[in-house]
C-alpha cells in the first residue's frame, strides 16, 4: 500500500483550501489497490482546475502525476496512448520534433491528459476542432467494482460520454488514446488587432472563424460606456515552412528552451486593486497599435501558453486566492448575455486582469461538457467578502440568457443553479447511478453540486 | 552497437528516473525488478521516448541464493554492458524489527544480502570484461546508527563497507565502483514520511548520479549538501549522541 500524506490542498485558484489524505501511486498495481479500499476516492491530475474539482476532505485523494508513461505511439497515424498523469508538456516535448501537435490545448501545458479529458477542455480552436474529447479514440477506466474497462464511441459509449467532462466522477481514467495532428513547424502566424468594444470583438471572432484555426480576445473588463468590452483580438494559424524567417526555418520544429520566471511568495492582497488593474488594462490596450492588424510569427509556447512562463502566477492574487468565472452563452443570446456580465463587473468595480473571450463551435459528445455553440467569457476575481454574492448575481444573468458555467473553473456554484443551467444533468446522473451507485468516486465539487 | 546498462530495482522511483536519463544518453537497458507489469510498461515507455532496446526480467530480492545466476544471465543478455546500477531498498518498519526478528531479517536481507549477491556476480562479470562501472544506492542512514532506523541503517552501513572493499579490489581491473548516499528523496518509499526536509526530486538525483559516473567519483551524497549534514552528525560525540532523540 502506497504511503499517505495529510496535506492542505487547493486548486489553481488557491480557494477553497482543504485538508486531504493524499496518495501518489507509481504503479498500476498500487492504483488498483488504492481504489479497491473501502471509502471514496478522488482523482487529481496537476491540480490546474481552479476550484474544488480535484480535492476532497473525506476521501482518498489519488495523485496521478507519477503515472505518466507512454503506452504506444504510431508514427504513421499520430495516435498516442498514454497514462492519465502525462502532462501536455511531456507530450509536446516528445511529439513536436517529430512534426505532431496536440489537437486541442488549454492555456497551460502543465495539466494532465486525464484532467483534460475529465474536464473536456477546450482551446482557442474550439470553433473549428471541438473540445479535447473529440480527438480521443478511447480511454481505459477503472470502475467502482475495480474492473478496467475500455470506453470509446463504439464500446461502452454511454460511459465514454459521461466521463468526457464528467469531472472524474465516473471512475479513474488510466490511459487516454489521443489523435495528434501533423504540423510543419513549431510556429504560429498570429494576427492581432485592437478592438473598440464588445460588438466589434464578437464580430471579428465570428467573421474570421473559417479562415482562422485559433482565435481569442482579451477584454478590458473595467472599461465602461462606449469602451465596454474593448480589447485585443488574436487570430492564429499553424505556420507553414514558407511563413518562417530564415532563422526560424533552419530548424522549424525545434524551439530553444523557454525562460521561466517565478513569483516567489503570495503578494499582499491589496496589490491587485481597482486602480492597479485599471492601469494595467489601459496600458495593455494602448500598447497595441491602433488600426490595422499586426502580423507576427511566434513559437507555439508564446501563442498558446503565455502564462506558463510565470510560475506560480496564482500567488499574485494574495493569500486568500481567487476564483475564475467562466460562462458561455448560446449564439442567439451571446451579445445580450456578455454585455450584461461586463456591465455588472464594470459597475461593481470587481476587476479582473484577464477577461478572455472565445468563440465556441459545435456541441461535442461529453454529456456534462461545458462548450456549446456561442461565446465564452472568463474573468478572474480575487476572493473577498463581497465577491461570492456578486458571482451569485452573475449566475442569474447566465441563467437568464440560457448560458452555463464551466466546472473546471468553479468553486462556488450551487447544485440547483447547476441543474438549471445544464440540460444533461439527469441523464448523466442515471449513468452515474449505474456505474457508481455508492459514489465511490467523489470530489468536493461533486458533493457540492449533488453529482456524487 | 549501443552501450548497455542494467538496473536492478528498475521500478523504484530513483530507478525509473535513472532509466530515463540513461535511455536519453542512448544506452540500451536491461530492467530487473519485482513488478512484471510495471517493468513492461516502463520498457514500452522508454522505447517510445528514446528509441532504445529494452529487455525486462523479474527477480525476487527475498531469494538471494538465486540472484548470482540471475545476474549472470542478465548481463550476458546485453551486448555491451558497461554500467550496473543497484537501486534496491526497503525501509522496513523499525519498531516491528525491534521485537520480531523476521521483520528485521527482511530489512537486512533486502538491503544488504541481496545487494551482496548481485554485486558479487556483477563484479566478476566486469572483471572478465576488464571494464565497467558499478553504482549502488546506499543511504545517509548508513553513516551513523540512530534509534529511529538503525536496522535499515545497519544494512546500508554494511553495504557501504562492502562497496569500499569491492572498489579496492576492482580498481586494478579497471572496474569502477560508486557508492551513492541519497538524503531525502521524494520517492514512493518516503511519500508521507514525517520529518522530511529539503526533499529532492528523483530526476535531479538521477542527473547527479549520471554526472558522478562521468566524473568517476567514488562516494557521492545526493543532493550534495548531505555530505555536510552527515559530517556534522558524525562529529557529535557518542556520549552526547546517545542521549539525543534522532
Ligand atoms: C493558466 C490556465 C489556463 C487554462 N486554460 C484553459 C482553457 O483554455 N480551456 C480549458 O478548457 N481549461 C483551461 N484551464 C483549466 C484546465 O485546463 C483544466 O482544469 C484541466 O483539466 C486541468 O488538468 P489537471 O491535470 O490539472 O486536472 P486537475 O485539476 O487535477 O483535475 C481536474 C478534474 O479532472 C479529474 N481528473 C484528473 N485526473 C483524472 C483521472 N486520471 N481520472 C479521472 N479523473 C481525473 C479531477 O478529479 C478533477 O475533477 C486552464 C487552467 C489554467 C491554470
Image (cartoon, coloured by chain):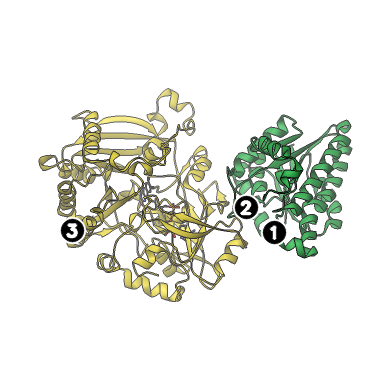
Chain colours: A yellow, B green
| Sequence order check, earlier mark of 1 and 2 | 1
Vertical placement of residue B193 versus A232, above or below: below
Q: Which mark is residue A397?
A: 3
From mark 2 to mark 3, how far is it between C-alphas? 50 Å
Which of the 4 quarters of the picture holds residue A57?
A: bottom left
Task: Classify residue A19 by image quadrant.
Answer: bottom left
Q: How far across and how far down the image is residue B156, in percent?
A: 77, 48
Residue underneath mark 1: B36
Dot 2 alpha-carbon crowd within 10 angstroms: few under 14, some 14 to 19, many 20 or more = some
Residue marked by disc 2: B190
Image quarter (top left, top right, bottom left or bottom right) of the N terminus of chain B? top right
Chain letter for mark 2, please: B
**Do dots 2 and 3 share one subunit?**
no
Residue A344 on image: x %, y % = 16, 51
Which is in the foreground here, disc 1 or disc 3?
3
The answer to whether residue B139 of the structure is visible from this angle is no
Secondary structure beneath dot 1 equals helix
Chain letter of disc 3 in the image: A
**Residue at 43% in and 23% down:** A246
User: Marks 1/2: CA distance?
Assistant: 22 Å
Decide if ligand 1 comes within 8 Å of the CB at mark 2. Answer: no
User: Comparing marks 2 and 3, which lies closer to the viewer?
Assistant: 2
The chain ID associated with circle 1 is: B
Q: Nearer the viewer, residue A40 or B15?
A: A40
Element type at mark 3: helix
Amino acid at each position: 500500500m502506497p504511503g499517505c500524506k495529510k496535506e492542505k490542498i487547493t486548486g489553481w485558484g488557491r480557494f477553497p483550501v482543504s485538508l486531504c489524505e493524499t496518495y501518489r501511486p507509481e504503479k498500476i498495481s498500487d492504483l488498483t489497490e488504492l481504489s479497491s479500499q473501502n471509502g471514496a476516492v478522488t482523482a487529481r491530475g496537476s491540480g490546474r482546475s481552479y476550484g474544488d474539482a480535484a480535492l476532497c476532505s473525506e476521501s482518498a485523494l489519488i495523485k496521478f502525476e507519477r503515472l505518466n508513461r507512454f503506452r504506444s505511439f504510431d508514427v504513421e497515424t499520430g495516435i498516442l496512448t498514454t497514462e492519465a498523469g502525462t502532462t501536455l508538456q511531456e507530450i509536446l516535448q516528445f511529439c513536436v520534433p517529430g512534426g505532431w501537435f496536440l489537437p486541442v490545448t488549454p492555456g497551460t501545458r502543465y495539466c494532465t491528459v486525464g484532467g483534460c479529458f475529465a474536464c473536456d477542455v477546450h482551446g482557442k480552436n474550439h470553433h473549428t476542432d471541438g473540445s479535447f474529447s473529440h480527438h480521443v479514440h478511447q480511454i481505459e477506466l477503472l470502475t467502482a467494482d475495480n474492473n478496467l474497462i475500455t470506453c470509446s464511441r463504439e464500446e461502452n459509449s454511454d460511459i465514454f460520454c459521461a466521463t468526457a467532462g464528467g469531472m472524474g466522477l465516473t471512475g479513474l481514467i488510466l490511459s487516454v488514446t489521443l489523435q495528434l495532428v501533423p504540423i510543419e513547424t513549431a510556429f504560429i502566424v498570429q494576427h492581432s488587432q485592437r478592438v473598440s468594444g464588445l460588438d466589434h470583438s464578437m464580430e471579428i471572432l465570428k467573421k474570421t472563424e473559417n479562415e482562422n484555426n485559433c482565435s481569442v480576445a482579451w477584454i478590458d473588463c473595467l472599461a465602461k460606456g462606449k469602451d465596454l468590452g474593448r480589447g485585443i483580438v488574436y487570430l492564429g494559424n499553424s505556420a507553414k515552412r514558407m511563413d518562417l524567417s530564415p532563422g526560424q526555418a533552419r530548424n522549424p520544429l525545434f524551439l530553444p528552451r523557454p525562460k521561466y520566471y517565478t513569483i516567489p511568495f503570495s503578494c499582499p492582497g491589496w496589490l491587485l486593486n481597482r486602480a492597479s488593474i485599471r492601469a494595467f488594462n489601459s496600458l495593455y490596450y494602448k500598447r497595441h497599435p491602433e488600426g490595422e492588424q499586426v502580423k507576427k510569427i511566434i513559437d507555439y509556447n508564446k501563442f498558446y501558453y503565455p502564462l506558463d512562463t510565470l510560475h506560480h502566477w496564482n500567488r499574485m492574487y494574495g493569500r486568500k486566492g481567487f476564483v475564475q468565472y467562466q460562462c458561455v452563452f448560446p449564439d442567439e443570446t451571446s451579445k445580450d448575455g456578455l454585455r450584461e456580465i461586463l456591465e455588472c463587473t464594470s459597475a461593481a468595480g470587481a476587476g479582473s486582469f484577464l477577461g478572455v473571450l472565445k468563440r465556441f463551435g459545435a456541441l461535442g459528445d461529453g454529456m456534462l461538457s461545458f462548450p456549446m455553440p456561442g461565446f465564452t467569457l472568463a474573468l478572474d476575481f480575487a476572493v473577498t467578502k463581497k465577491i461570492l454574492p456578486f458571482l451569485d448575481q452573475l449566475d442569474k444573468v447566465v441563467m437568464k440568457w440560457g448560458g452555463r458555467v464551466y466546472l473546471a473553473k468553479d468553486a462556488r456554484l450551487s447544485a440547483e443553479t447547476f441543474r438549471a443551467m445544464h440540460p444533461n444533468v439527469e441523464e448523466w446522473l442515471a449513468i452515474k447511478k449505474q456505474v457508481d451507485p455508492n459514489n465511490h468516486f467523489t470530489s468536493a465539487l461533486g458533493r457540492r453540486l449533488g453529482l456524487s | 552497437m549501443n552501450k548497455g546498462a542494467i538496473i536492478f530495482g528498475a521500478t523504484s522511483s530513483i530507478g525509473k528516473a535513472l532509466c530515463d536519463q540513461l535511455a536519453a544518453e542512448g544506452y540500451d537497458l536491461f530492467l530487473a525488478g519485482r513488478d512484471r507489469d510495471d517493468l513492461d510498461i516502463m520498457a514500452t515507455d522508454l522505447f517510445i521516448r528514446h528509441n532504445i532496446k529494452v529487455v525486462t526480467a523479474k527477480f525476487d530480492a527475498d531469494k538471494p541464493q538465486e540472484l548470482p545466476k540471475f545476474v549472470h544471465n542478465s548481463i550476458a543478455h546485453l551486448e555491451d554492458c558497461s554500467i550496473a546500477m543497484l537501486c534496491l531498498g526497503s525501509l522496513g518498519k523499525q519498531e516491528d524489527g525491534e521485537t520480531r526478528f523476521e521483520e528485521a531479517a527482511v530489512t537486512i536481507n533486502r538491503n544488504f544480502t541481496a545487494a551482496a549477491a548481485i554485486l558479487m556476480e556483477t563484479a566478476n562479470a566486469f572483471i572478465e570484461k576488464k571494464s565497467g562501472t558499478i553504482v549502488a544506492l546506499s543511504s545517509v542512514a548508513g553513516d551513523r546508527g540512530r534509534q529511529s532506523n538503525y536496522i535499515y541503517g545497519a544494512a546500508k552501513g554494511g553495504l557501504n563497507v562492502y562497496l569500499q572493499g569491492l572498489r579496492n579490489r576492482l580498481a586494478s581491473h579497471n572496474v569502477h565502483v560508486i557508492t551513492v548516499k541519497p538524503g531525502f528523496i521524494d520517492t514512493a518509499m518516503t511519500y508521507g514520511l514525517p520529518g522530511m526536509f529539503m526533499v529532492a526530486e528523483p530526476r535531479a538525483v538521477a542527473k547527479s548520479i549520471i554526472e558522478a559516473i562521468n566524473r568517476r567519483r567514488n562516494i557521492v551524497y545526493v543532493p550534495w549538501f548531505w555530505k555536510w549534514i552527515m559530517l556534522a552528525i558524525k562529529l557529535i560525540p557518542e556520549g552526547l549522541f546517545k542521549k539525543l532523540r534522532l
